[in-house]
Image (cartoon, helix red, strand yellow):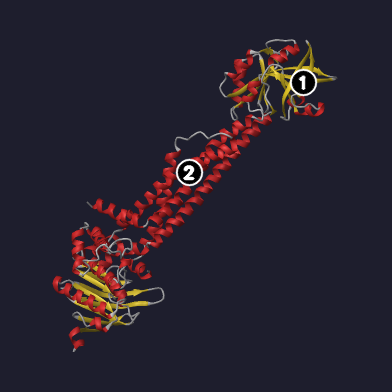
Amino acid sequence: MKRRWFLYFFKRSLSQRKGRVAIASLAVVLAVSIITSMISITSGVREKLGSELKAYGSNIIVSPGRGSSFPFETAEAIRRIDDVEYAVGQVFTTARLGKESIEIIGLDIAKLREAGWRVSGEWPQKEGEVLAGANLKAALKIKPDEIVSLEGGRGRTDFRVSGFVERGGAEDNAVIMPMASAWRLAGVNGVLNAVLVRGRAGGLDNLVSEIKRGLPEVSVKTFRQVASAEESLLSKMQLLMSLVTIVVLFAAAISVASTMGANILERREEIGLMKAIGATGSGIRIFYLAEALLVGFIGGTAGFILGVASAQAVSRGAFGSFIPAQWYLPLASLIIGLVISAGASYFPVRDVLKYNPAVILREE
Amino acid sequence: MPLITVNSIIKEYETAHALRGVSMEVKKGEWVNIMGASGSGKSTLLNIIGGLDSATSGDVIIDSVNIEKLSEDELAVFRREKIGIIFQQAHLIPYLTAVENVMIAQYFHSMADESEAKEALQRVGLGQRLSHRPSQLSGGEQQRICIARALINSPELLLADEPTGNLDRENTKMILELLKKLHSEDHFTIVLVTHDHFVSTHGDRILTMEDGHIIRDEPVNDLRS
């Protein structure tokens, strides 16, 4: 019965103060959405940046331990190891283009796309199409779709240049073509001169050991600078995002506290009156806490939806794909909404309750 | 045995003395008016008797309970059981209707009862204004809700702080007649603070205060004569 009347007065308070409740809820929605969005982005940024960094190249090179080549299947064996993001087998040869001797890199073009290489123009689609490095393009004034005639160990072959790559490495001075074309040009078959591997940042030493254990006849080296720079970048980025999230959490909590605190101060007379007519501290607190929890629930739920949507929009804009959903985020958003809302209400009510009713009512 | 015994109450603020050792007694069923100029300490004394404010020193004993020794929550419980309070400003909750403003006092006391609350409002002549919100009512009507709220839990003691202070003469008479009628029917004790001589001529006794002291204690009849 008492609960029924509590709910009655609670509903009356809400229905007659819709505007105030809406403003308080909006403050919590904004706070929770910003925090949820930051948590979501912070959690996803490592993975997203990691995959972005893929495009900057491999961090391990596997080469033959003895001789100058190893079987084509070596690349496949490496690809099967955990923590290998990609492994691209390469065959190196040279060919003449007019009077110039140029480097030829043969590899699996599909794997390059998977590795995040970016090409201006088009990827080779069929036999006889190649990519040219940016330096080569400039030096030899190669135009898109130009036919180049390359002379290798097995005679002269014409290739169409479908696109260009610029990576700041040896690829910029070379012609890159499908493996089979390079084999034909070099007069070899089924061999590789190197496998470029990209391992997940942070676990490279383990990966090197694992490759060596599985393929004892090969030589494995890490590109230390690339690996450590990536690891450092990822760690710093995550630390930065975490700090920004904490700052945002405080700023949002202060904003909610000031909105809800103003609401409570506006109702000082009401609190003083309740006290004067015989309400105990807990009897009064429960009214305001119930409202704060409702506001927190609305804010937490709506804030979660808005926060996830904005995080996905940011991710889509920055990384071109969505952030994977975190299982804990709905619960975390709700808890954040409830805690900041209840906290923002609890302390002002506690402060008002410290005063004698006479003091509060005299001020009104 | 008196219902209220006030012993040597002192109330000091940082820069002023509001009460300088006030002692008084009020018998059960008595109507006592406290008069005095602004700043004489009369409202402070009433607030301390009602447990709405605390004394710097001294005792207030109501119905054998020294309320100065009670905790905040014990005091709240004591207040809702024993005391009804009428303020100069009605202090009504703006988003509740007249009947709900009475029911909230019932809710904090024990259980809200709509029919009892309506009956209380009918007794103070507001039977036609049950569903009106405070902003839709006149000052006199708001004050009558305040009286209904103060009496709804059948208190032994009714404290009224300038209950007609904001009202015109006509509404003042109406409120005083109402208090007289309720007092004669229910026989509760009244302590009423006023600076209005006309108001003070109602009741049994008048205490006059000046500069934190009670300087006179006389029956109303003497004043009338």
Q: Give the spatial CA distance, label 2 vs label 1.
A: 53 Å
Label at residue A236: none
Instruction: Name the image quarter holding residue B130.
Output: bottom left
Label 1 neighbour load within 10 Å: few <14, some 14-19, many 20+: some
Q: Position of residue A49 (x, y in %)?
A: 60, 34
Q: Nearer the viewer, residue B27 or A287?
A: A287
Q: Position of residue A145 (x, y in %)?
A: 74, 24
Mark 2 or 1, closer to the camera = 1
Mark 1 or mark 2, which is nearer the start of the sequence? 1
Amino acid at dot 1? Ile
Q: Chain of mark 2?
A: A
Q: Nearer the viewer, residue B76 or A108?
A: A108
Which residue lies under the disc numbered 1?
A147
Check the picture and name the quadrant holding the N terminus of chain B: bottom left
Q: Position of residue B99 (x, y in %)?
A: 24, 62
Please say if B223 is above or below A278. below
The residue under the point 53% across, 34% down is A322
The residue under the point 53% across, 35% down is A323
Check the picture and name the quadrant holding the C terminus of chain B: bottom left
Q: Secondary structure at mark 2?
A: helix
Label at residue A306: 2
Amino acid at dot 2? Leu
Q: Position of residue B97 (x, y in %)?
A: 28, 62
In the picture provided, is A260 more to the left or to the right than B20? Answer: right
> Does residue B155 appear anywhere in the picture?
no
The residue under the point 39% across, 59% down is A264
Q: Nearer the viewer, residue A357 or A3?
A: A3
